[in-house]
């Protein structure tokens, strides 16, 4: 019966990233690959979930209070005026919110612009909707948006632009200048924008997250997606949302209901507690992640990496392999797992065909630093600077 499987399922084969994750699990490698915390979620948030479960709030449920709090937050943080009764869809994580948004606006043949490197789930959702992903490369080493390349990527079939900022995998925070280029193009070409803002509270130094929807003329055409997952260290709870003007939000809600009906009830209740955390929680979040970022940057420098771009946000470092290491990203990660017992993600899984220059696509490795101090210190002990013999092992794997 395998031949009767859908074309979509045949395309959704395990990636090298998934295969290496299985290898890492088999050998018990320290996980600097996947972007989930291995430290406890906030006590007050866990307590709220426990109370909700004990109170038997375990059935299908829509907690309107989440929308009320989010509306207040968007007005405070971004100057956006949204109606909590009509402008939100509470979904099973940002992933479902994004998928429902894509299914709400994309018809077969519609083109969707994405910035490469790009989180792979976006492409899958677009293709399931029979849309066509079109990649706009960001220029290394600082992952600069080239306005000319971006504008030339639009056609009469372009329906939407996807923006993830702070960005996975590079850690780039798109600047006000970047956002102006994107907003002007979206308005000129009369297309949607879908944003993924899950790392909005995790930025470093003087970098500040700006929502694309806050720019003039953009709220009416922008779908914001985000979640509890990264900010509150609860990636397994699957509470996310989409925010858009009423008629677009209604379309997303209708699809969400057909897909999953409702997000997990007790965790919706806990979301109310999380989203009303005091300002010192967010200050502590940024401070703690800043320390983790600096630790892993020093770890990688000690190991031999030359860090040309330090993450401005998110929980990832996208590190370029030293030019003296003539090895692909996949072979490097395989050796790192087998020889050092540390797992990372080969960067090539985030790239897509670029006819002009593919030379750097296999030269990057993503490391996640949303890990406990113990995990990061254990990784540092295992990732000692390679000796000449270790370098030869790396080279010989070619």
Image: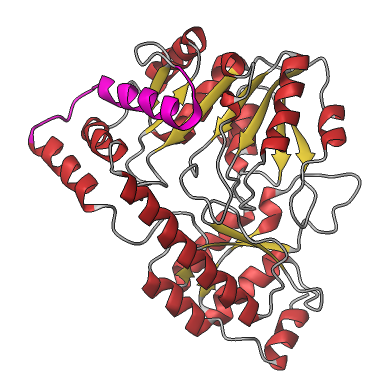
Q: Is residue 133 visible?
A: no
Left or right: residue 304 compared with residue 208: right
Residue 73 falls within the magenta-colored stretch: yes
Pick out the residue farthest to the right: 356
Q: How is the image coloured?
A: secondary structure
Image quadrant where residue 335 sits: bottom right
Pick out the residue farthest to the left: 55
Marks counted in the figure total: 0
As drawn, 384 above or below 244: below
Left or right: residue 246 compared with residue 118: left
Image quadrant where residue 85 sits: top left
As drawn, 103 above or below 296: above
- What residue is shown at x 58% (from left), y 34% (from top)? 9
Magenta residue span: 55-81
Pick out the residue farthest to the top: 247
Image quadrant where residue 28 sits: bottom left
Where's residue 274, x and y in %?
A: 28, 40
As drawn, 383 above or below 132: below
Which is nearer the eye, 293 or 254?
A: 293
Where's residue 79, x and y in %?
A: 49, 24
Where's residue 144, x and y in %?
A: 77, 47
Q: Quadrant of the C terminus?
A: bottom right
Left or right: residue 376 compared with residue 187: left
- What residue is shown at x 74% (from left), y 54% (from top)? 142
Where's residue 93, x and y in %?
A: 41, 35
Q: Quadrant of the N terminus?
A: top right
Which is nearer the eye, 130 or 218?
A: 218
- What residue is shown at x 61% (from left), y 57% (from top)? 311
Which is nearer the eye, 9 or 220?
A: 220
Q: Is residue 180 visible?
A: yes
């Amino acid at each position: 019966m395998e031949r009767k499987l859908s074309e979509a399922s045949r395309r959704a084969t395990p990636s090298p990233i998934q295969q290496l994750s299985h290898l890492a699990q088999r050998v018990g490698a320290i996980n600097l690959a996947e972007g989930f915390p291995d430290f406890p979620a906030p006590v007050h948030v866990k307590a709220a979930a426990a109370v909700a479960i004990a109170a038997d709030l375990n059935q299908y449920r829509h907690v309107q209070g989440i929308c009320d709090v989010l509306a207040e937050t968007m007005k405070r943080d971004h100057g956006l005026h949204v109606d909590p009764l009509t402008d939100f869809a509470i979904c099973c994580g940002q992933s479902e919110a994004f998928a429902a948004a894509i299914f709400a606006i994309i018809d077969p043949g519609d083109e969707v612009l994405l910035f490469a490197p790009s989180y792979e789930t976006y492409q899958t959702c677009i293709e399931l909707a029979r849309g066509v992903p079109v990649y706009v490369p960001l220029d290394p080493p600082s992952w600069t948006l080239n306005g000319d390349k971006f504008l030339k990527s639009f056609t009469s079939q372009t329906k939407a632009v996807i923006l993830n900022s702070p960005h996975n995998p590079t850690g780039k925070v798109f600047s006000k200048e970047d956002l102006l280029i994107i907003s002007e193009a979206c308005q000129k070409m009369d297309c949607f924008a879908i944003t993924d803002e899950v790392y909005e509270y995790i930025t470093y130094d003087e970098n500040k997250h700006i929502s694309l929807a806050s720019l003039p003329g953009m709220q009416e055409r922008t779908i914001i997606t985000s979640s509890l997952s990264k900010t509150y260290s609860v990636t397994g709870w699957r509470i996310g949302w989409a925010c858009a003007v009423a008629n677009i939000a209604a379309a997303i809600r209708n699809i969400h209901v057909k897909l999953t009906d409702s997000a997990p009830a007790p965790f919706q209740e806990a979301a109310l507690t999380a989203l009303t955390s005091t300002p010192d929680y967010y200050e502590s979040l940024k401070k703690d992640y800043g320390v983790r970022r600096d630790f892993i940057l020093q770890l990688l420098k000690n190991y031999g990496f030359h860090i040309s771009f330090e993450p401005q946000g998110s929980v990832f470092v996208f590190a370029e392999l030293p030019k003296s290491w003539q090895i692909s990203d996949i072979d490097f990660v395989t050796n790192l797992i087998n020889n050092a017992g540390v797992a990372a993600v080969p960067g090539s899984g985030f790239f897509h065909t670029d006819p002009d220059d593919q030379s750097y696509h296999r030269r990057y490795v993503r490391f996640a630093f949303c890990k406990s101090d113990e995990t990061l210190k254990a990784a540092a002990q295992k990732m000692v600077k390679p000796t000449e013999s270790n370098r030869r092992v790396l080279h010989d794997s070619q």
